Image: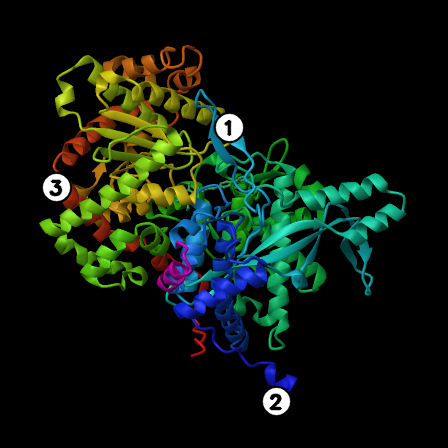
């Protein structure tokens, strides 16, 4: 007998089994009925897709339960708005987080296939530039793990961050990242939630039913936003949330309309816009170039996401605007989605007819803003004329927001017109500019920095006046990383050693790693710890041979600097030190006896338009080539620049690192998160007192980190005194010779090649104080080298690093966001058992 349809509706499907047999059957069925392949004919890629599908079925079952439960309890949710997500690969993470890794590995073994080999079929989801994008991905993992009802919103870029190659001289070449390739088994297209977005046009003064003038946005162009969802699997939790990514396309109807009116070229223009908006991720991770398409991207993303949030809120009869802010929290990942505050005001005031004050209150209660940078060139500002062209009504609303805000300021400071200029959202000048950071602070209830030092500088330097006005709005949320991807998945051997030593609860409670501290002097534990590190280094040595054609000795110190290429991150300081060591070895044969063998490992992408950054890459590659082929130094030094850095490459490099380079100019790196990943995997940090390094030192202790160089206060003092890099150049012969040598033409045969580096460091005034920190850096490097020569001593320090960085779990960070900003409680869907 069939059950009547109304009995089936609302009945959860029976829970899918996850035994070895069941997984085998599922993989087999997907090979046959999803991919139409018999196992003998299936390629590796087919097997990979079939495994993803088998896992996906189980993940989606949990996701449906999660969504249903959230709906039933009419939960409050947080919506994370980010233009970037660096998700990396998903299969291994989803397997480990859902507890299906071992059973799937066994099932595949029985089917004659190897899971670890299949994992390599997946390409990275590289929809971000660097730290900010990876942080968003770690946060999604933590929110699902902590059973927090949340939705991530982003853009489904057709091309993520470019693929990096080097030409035969070692210069960076960019290639498009066509990551979608043969499709993405994790993606679920949601055509039922399409939205239409309007842009451009003009504002017309019309009259409402009561004869009152009302601004109406007319003659707009339209594009369609198509959502697709990526499931986000919590680790050992009941929750599967999702990441909703918007793809733009042209609206067919509109095309036709324009076409019929004779606007053939116009209609095609519309199509081009629709197809262009989500085409490519902007590859700058700091400098804002004010491009129209970028503004269109931001608004498209924001308009789609807000529509979706409002639709979901209104789906429930119990909900109205009165409880919108009770049910909806929206976190802005930097100012990139900040136009959302204006869009919500537009919807509330223009479309819903709410009073301004009421709308403003909802807006402030709903939004909170995270700042990720102090660099002036990275603070987003849009020219008023451009803004007016793309979003004319929004510009009016910004003027209104600003006017009301400045009226308040004028009331507080009646005799200080300078204050108004200082605090205005609109910066005077030609053209006038919209300051998105000011708008974000004013329109939200929370502004947070991403490390203690960063937040301090934020309140004291970037927003001092706002901080005085609204001290309660400012708070710190020190960044974190997910221990699932950044230890459990990427370093399975160390994870197993930790499991055996302190139990397997640490991935959800990273403070437990502290229990490893008592094993730091245990010779047997040290031996195992070092043996694992060595095996990770052997694996990386294989990758370096394959990708760079350089042979390296796994017993040498692996000295790692992996991050975007930036002057403030000072990869060129690292390079000057390498040159110093190289010269020492060539000139002083005795020094060979005491030199610690080292492999300097770099990985970094430079923004395609950042000429100096690209020059630094070229310089590192050129020096690497010389050093790696110089028989005189007996292989004591090697330099490898691994191309195309991304999440997956980070997962290979980090477990193999001995020394972690975190050498930014004090006050410039908001937090850093690579520093946390490396310390967690037992690398020692050599670094400045910048960003989260300050807090890492607090946790691991002064004896287990190599801190050097100018502090933020020293930097201030030095600038006040008047810093002249030439003075240092003339004082420090070792430095002078290394720099002269680099820029002499010796390494490429062309003296002009690295002149821009020299110019920036000398006549350019050395804006990031590379020369000022050089001597202290070289000294700290000597200490590190010496310490590495005593393996037991080094092992003890490395173990203490792993043991001491529990604070930097993104679970801790997200708990603080949930409690202190979002006012959001965990909600546990049941498991269906
Ligand atoms: C803005 C406008 C136009 C085009 C691009 C951009 C843009 C894109 C990305 C500007 C900045 C970014 C990314 C910034 C970033 O990654 N910041 C890093 O954030 C990390 C997480 O908080 C911190 O750990 C790093 O210190 C910070 O540099």
Residue 452 place in picture, x, y as percent: 33, 48
How far is disc 2 from disc 1 in space, using C-alphas? 65 Å
Choose between 33 and 126: the one closer to the eye.
33
Residue named by callout 1: 173
In the picture, measured across the screen, residue 112 lies left or right of residue 282, that is left
Nearer-N-terminus badge (1/3)? 1
Nearer-N-terminus badge (2/3)? 2
* Residue ID at (71%, 41%): 389
Residue named by callout 2: 1
- Circle 3 — which element? helix
What stretch of residues is rendered in magenta?
102-114
Residue 138 place in picture, x, y as percent: 41, 53
Q: Which disc, if any, is residue 419?
A: none
The colour scheme of the drawn protein is: rainbow
- Count residues near mark 1 (Cα–Cα under 10 Å), then give few for <14, some for 14-19, many for 20+: some
- Of tags 2 and 1, the one toward the viewer is 2
* Residue ID at (19%, 45%): 531
Nearer-N-terminus badge (2/1)? 2
* Residue ID at (27%, 40%): 537
In the picture, measured across the screen, residue 288 lies left or right of residue 105, that is right
Residue named by callout 3: 793
């Amino acid at each position: 007998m069939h059950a009547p349809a109304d009995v089936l509706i609302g009945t959860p499907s029976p829970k899918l089994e996850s035994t070895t047999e069941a997984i085998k059957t599922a993989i087999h069925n997907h090979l046959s009925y999803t991919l139409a392949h018999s196992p003998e004919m299936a390629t590796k890629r087919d097997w990979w897709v079939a495994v993803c599908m088998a896992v996906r079925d189980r993940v989606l079952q949990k996701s449906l339960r999660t969504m249903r439960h959230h709906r039933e309890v009419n939960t409050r949710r947080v919506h994370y708005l980010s233009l970037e997500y660096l998700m990396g690969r998903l299969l291994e993470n989803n397997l480990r987080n859902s507890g299906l890794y071992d059973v799937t590995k066994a099932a595949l073994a029985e089917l004659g296939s190897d899971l670890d080999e299949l994992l390599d079929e997946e390409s990275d989801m590289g929809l971000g530039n660097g730290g900010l994008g990876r942080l968003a991905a770690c946060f999604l993992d933590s929110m699902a793990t902590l059973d927090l009802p949340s939705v991530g919103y982003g853009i489904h870029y057709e091309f993520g961050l470019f693929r990096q190659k080097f030409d035969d001289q070692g210069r960076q070449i960019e290639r498009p990242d066509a990551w979608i390739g043969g499709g993405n088994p994790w993606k679920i297209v949601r055509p039922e939630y399409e939205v239409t977005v309007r842009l451009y046009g003009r504002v017309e003064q019309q009259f409402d039913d009561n004869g009152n003038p009302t601004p109406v946005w007319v003659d707009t162009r339209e594009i369609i936003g198509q959502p697709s969802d990526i499931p986000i699997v919590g680790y050992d939790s009941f929750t599967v949330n999702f990441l909703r990514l918007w793809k733009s396309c042209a609206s067919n109807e509109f095309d036709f309309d324009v076409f019929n009116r004779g606007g053939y070229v116009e209609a095609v223009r519309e199509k081009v816009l629709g197809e262009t908006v989500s085409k490519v991720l902007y590859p700058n991770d700091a400098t804002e170039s004010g491009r129209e398409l970028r503004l269109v991207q931001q608004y498209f993303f924001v308009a789609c996401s807000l529509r979706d949030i409002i639709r979901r809120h209104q789906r429930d009869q119990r909900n109205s605007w009165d409880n919108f802010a009770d049910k909806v929290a929206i976190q802005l990942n930097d100012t990139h989605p900040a136009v959302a505050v204006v869009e919500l005001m537009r919807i509330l005031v223009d479309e819903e007819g709410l009073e301004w004050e009421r709308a403003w209150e909802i807006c402030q209660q709903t939004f909170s803003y995270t700042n990720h940078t102090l660099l002036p060139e990275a603070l987003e500002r849009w020219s008023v004329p451009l803004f007016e062209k793309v979003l004319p009504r929004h510009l009016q609303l910004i003027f209104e927001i600003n006017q009301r805000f400045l009226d308040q300021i004028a009331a507080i400071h009646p005799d200080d017109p300078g204050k108004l200029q200082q605090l205005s959202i609109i910066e005077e000048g030609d053209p006038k500019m919209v300051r998105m950071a000011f708008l974000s602070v004013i329109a939200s209830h929370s502004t947070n920095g991403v490390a203690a030092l960063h937040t301090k500088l934020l309140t004291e330097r970037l927003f001092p006046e706002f901080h005085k006005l609204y001290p309660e709005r400012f708070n710190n949320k020190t960044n974190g990383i997910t221990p699932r991807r950044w230890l459990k998945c990427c370093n399975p051997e160390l994870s197993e050693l930790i499991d055996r030593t302190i139990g397997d609860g640490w991935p959800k409670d990273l403070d437990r790693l502290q229990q490893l501290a008592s094993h730091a002097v245990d010779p047997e534990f040290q031996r195992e710890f070092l043996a694992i590190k060595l095996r990770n280094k052997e694996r990386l040595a294989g990758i370096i041979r394959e990708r760079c054609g350089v042979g390296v000795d796994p017993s040498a110190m692996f000295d790692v600097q992996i991050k975007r290429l930036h002057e403030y991150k000072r990869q060129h300081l690292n390079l000057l030190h390498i040159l110093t060591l190289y010269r020492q070895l060539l000139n002083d044969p005795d020094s060979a006896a005491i030199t610690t063998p080292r492999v300097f490992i770099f990985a970094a992408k430079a923004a395609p338009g950042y000429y100096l950054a690209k020059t630094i890459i070229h310089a590192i590659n050129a020096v690497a080539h010389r050093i790696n082929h110089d028989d005189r130094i007996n292989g004591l030094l090697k330099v490898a620049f691994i191309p195309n850095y991304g999440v997956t490459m980070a997962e290979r490099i980090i477990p193999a690192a001995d020394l972690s380079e975190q050498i930014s100019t004090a006050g410039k790196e908001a937090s850093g998160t690579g520093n946390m990943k490396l310390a967690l995997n037992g690398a020692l940090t050599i670094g400045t007192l910048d960003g989260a390094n300050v807090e890492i030192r607090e946790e691991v202790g002064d004896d287990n980190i190599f801190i050097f160089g100018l502090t933020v206060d020293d930097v201030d003092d030095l600038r006040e005194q008047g810093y002249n890099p030439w003075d240092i150049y003339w004082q420090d012969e070792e430095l002078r010779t290394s720099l002269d040598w680099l820029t002499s033409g010796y390494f490429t045969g062309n003296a002009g090649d690295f002149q821009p580096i020299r110019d920036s460091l000398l006549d350019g005034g050395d804006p990031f104080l590379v020369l000022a920190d050089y001597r202290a850096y070289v000294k700290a490097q000597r200490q590190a080298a010496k310490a590495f020569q005593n393996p037991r001593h080094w092992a003890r320090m490395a173990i203490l690093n792993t043991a001491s960085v529990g604070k930097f779990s993104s679970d801790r960070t997200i708990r603080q966001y949930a409690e202190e900003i979002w006012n959001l409680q965990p909600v546990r869907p049941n498991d269906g058992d």
